[in-house]
Image (cartoon, helix red, strand yellow):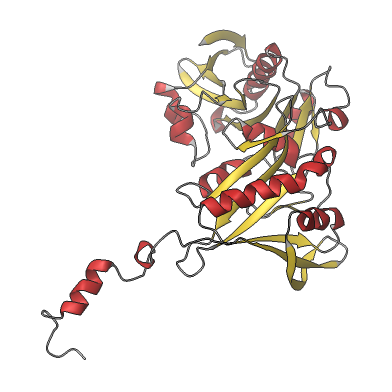
């Protein structure tokens, strides 16, 4: 923990503490995604994520906090989250003092890009002061003075990329990929309803939780600079009758389109290992590059949903592309699913010795 003191414009002394998980007594005093809260704040994700929390106190009372999440190894990109000031302490400059500390700490590790979102014009003014600017949807992005032409260079080709399972370290890395302007596919990430002009940060947490307990898989394409240049996530249907089918969503940056089919094939292998027989992907009809990538991986157009999508100007058909996998057996029995009769119930029905006499 590090500590510094700042005098506010009210004359009060703001003590700023920089804390790293596990946060112990501060767990209940700071923000975090509900789906990740216990694991992250108790220090169970430090292998993957460096998450300093900046906590402001006046006379021992927590009056504001914020954090950023960056990969533990590279620390080059991050997402700023859970910026909050207690209502009775607003307009004192607390958030500004905390943000100043946050940016300084991020730059210590030569960080170059931070992402956040806001729908509050007052908060937007604060972020503008610290070099954040409006980026995708309601998102904003900070670029360090030495970031150069970030959009052109960060995801540039630098040799073949490798395919691996996603980890929590990919939360900020995936944000770069999904908040990048290219490719301009209308359906950017299907599961979290992320479209072309929708920003992406916390969506990654939802995706990682959805695939738990063999419900799906998440693979990424990582280049030699440890940057995520492609992702593919699949999630099976949660019924006995549909457990053999999964929906797949994917994104690949243009500099690595040549490995798109390879990424999709890796996702299909993951699906087969999970006893998934059919993979279905939804695509906007006019996204020709995405369609060609699917065809190269063996997917075929199976259905057309007329006028399902709208891009602000016109209605567009949504296509369903499917890949069928051979020699796949069901994973779970019917009794594994909610609402279906369990084995012990079947046994009692078969025995019938306690059946009420007035039952039909």
At which x and y percent is residue 101?
A: 65, 15
Any part of residue 207 in sight: yes
Does residue 122 appear in this view? no
The correct choice, above or below, for 346 with respect to 209 in the image is: below
The residue at 62%/16% (across/down) is 10
Residue 168: percent from the left, percent from the top? 57, 33
193 above or below 301? above
From the viewer's perspective, is residue 360 above or below residue 6? below
Q: State the count of labels.
A: 0
Farthest residue toward the front? 327
Front-most of 270 and 149?
270
- Camera-side residue of 313 and 256: 256
Task: Locate the C terminus and report the quarter of the image it occupies.
Answer: bottom left
Q: Say which residue appears at 60% left-offset and 30% top-offset.
A: 169
Q: Quadrant of residue 26?
A: top left
Residue 42 on image: x %, y %: 43, 27
Horizontal side of 120 relative to 256 (left or right) equals left
Give the camera-side residue of 279 and 66: 279
19 lies above or below 295: above
Location of residue 287 (image quadrant): bottom right
Q: Is residue 114 left or right of residue 60?
A: right
Q: Position of residue 162 (x, y in %)?
A: 69, 34
Query: In the displayed structure, does residue 81 sit left or right of residue 291?
Result: left
């Amino acid at each position: 923990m590090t500590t510094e003191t700042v005098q506010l414009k009210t004359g009060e002394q703001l003590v700023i503490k920089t804390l790293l998980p596990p946060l112990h007594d501060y767990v209940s005093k700071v923000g975090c995604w509900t789906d990740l809260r216990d694991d992250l704040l108790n220090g169970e994700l430090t292998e993957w994520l460096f998450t300093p929390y900046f906590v402001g106190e006046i006379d021992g009372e927590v009056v504001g906090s914020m954090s950023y999440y960056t990969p533990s190894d590279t620390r080059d990109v991050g997402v700023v989250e859970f910026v909050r000031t207690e209502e009775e302490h607003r307009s004192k400059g607390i958030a500004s003092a905390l943000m100043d500390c946050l940016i300084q700490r991020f730059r210590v590790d030569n960080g170059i890009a931070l992402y956040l979102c806001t729908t509050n014009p007052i908060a937007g003014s604060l972020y503008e002061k610290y070099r954040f600017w409006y980026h995708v949807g309601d998102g904003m992005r900070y670029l360090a003075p030495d970031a150069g032409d970030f959009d052109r260079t960060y995801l540039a080709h630098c040799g073949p990329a490798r395919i691996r399972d996603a980890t929590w370290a990919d939360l900020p890395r995936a944000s770069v990929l999904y908040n990048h302007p290219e490719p301009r596919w209308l359906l950017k990430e299907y599961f979290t309803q992320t479209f072309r002009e929708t920003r992406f940060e916390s969506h990654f947490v939802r995706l990682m939780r959805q695939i738990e307990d063999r419900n799906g898989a998440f693979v990424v394409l990582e280049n030699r600079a440890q940057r995520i240049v492609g992702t593919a996530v699949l999630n099976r249907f949660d019924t006995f009758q549909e457990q053999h089918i999964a929906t797949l969503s994917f994104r690949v940056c243009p500099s690595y389109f040549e490995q798109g089919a390879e990424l999709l094939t890796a996702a299909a292998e993951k699906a087969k290992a999970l006893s998934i027989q059919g993979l279905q992907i939804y695509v906007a009809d006019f996204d020709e590059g995405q369609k060609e990538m699917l065809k190269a991986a063996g997917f075929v157009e199976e259905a057309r949903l007329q006028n399902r999508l709208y891009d602000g100007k016109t209605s567009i058909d949504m296509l369903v592309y499917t890949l069928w996998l051979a020699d796949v057996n069901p994973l779970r029995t019917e009794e594994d699913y909610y609402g279906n009769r369990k084995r012990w119930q079947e046994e009692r029905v078969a025995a019938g010795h306690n059946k009420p006499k007035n039952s039909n």
